[in-house]
Structure formats: C-alpha cells, structure tokens
Image: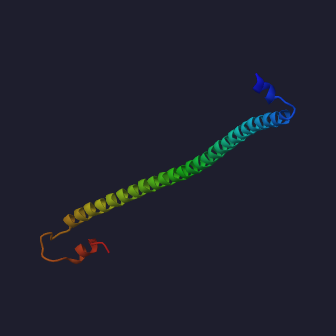
Amino acid sequence: MAWLSALFTKQMVPVILIAALLAVAGIATRAAVGKVSDMIDDRIATAKAERDAHWRAEVAEANAALSGAIAELARQAMRADGEIRAAEAAAHDQLKQMEVDNAALPDGDGCGVSARRLQLLPR
C-alpha cells in the first residue's frame, strides 16, 4: 500500500493525468482511424461498383451493336442466297429451253453448227 500512496503524491498527479489523457487520445485516435478506414473502404467499393456498372453498360452496348450487325449480315446472306438460287434456276430453265429448241431444229445429226443453231448460243 505504501507504493500506492507514493504513486498518488502531488508530484505524480500531473504525470498520471497526462498519461491518462494520452491513453484517451490514443484510444480516440484509433477509433477515428478505424472510422476513416471504413469510409475509405466504402468509397473504394462504391467506385468499383460504378466502374463495373459503366463497363457492363459499354459491353452490353457493344454486344447489341454486334448482334445487330450479325443479324443484318444474315439477312444479306439469305437475300444473296435467294438471288443465287433464282439465277441458277433461270440458267437451268434457259439451258432446258435451248435443248428443246435445238432438238426442234431439222438436221439434228448433221456435222458442224448451222446458222440457226448458232443463233441459239448465248452471246
């Protein structure tokens, strides 16, 4: 007990008060640093979420444009395919008609090409 009464002498009271104030200041500083750290973490999370949302929107916009371009190319390919099939059918019909016209001409087993047969050839 003697050491306790020696601890609280008039000379030691200011030292004890300063030590207590420093301890309270340290605890308050630690709490403030924790709150600032939490605020920084929240701001970082918000910034990441905003960045991710921005790039998701950019990717979605690019995907939509790409899908539109792919659909347009598919339509063009279908149109071209239809035109090619129509041209093939017309050429086939023309060939059949030429064969019919050639068979209708007289002297079918003659050698050479007559003037009338020459008119059947495409120009």
46 shown above or below 65: above
Image quarter hosting the N terminus: top right
Question: Where 68 sits versus 105, above or below?
Answer: above
**Figure quadrant of the C terminus:** bottom left
Which is more toward the observer, 71 or 1?
1
User: Observer-nearest residue: 100 or 37?
Assistant: 37
User: Is 29 left, or right, of 60 in this rendering?
Assistant: right
Q: Is residue 6 above or below residue 86?
A: above
Residue in the image at 79% along x and 33% along y: 20
Q: Residue 10 appears at what percent x and percent y? A: 87, 32
Q: Position of residue 77 (x, y in %)?
A: 42, 56
**Residue, far top:** 1
Query: Residue 83 at x, y = what percent?
Result: 40, 58
Image point (35%, 56%), residue name: 85
Q: Picture quarter containing residue 80? A: bottom left
> Which residue corresponds to the image point at 55% horizontal and 50% vertical from the top-left?
59
Q: Is residue 62 left or right of residue 89?
A: right
Q: In the displayed structure, does residue 59 sit left or right of residue 117?
A: right
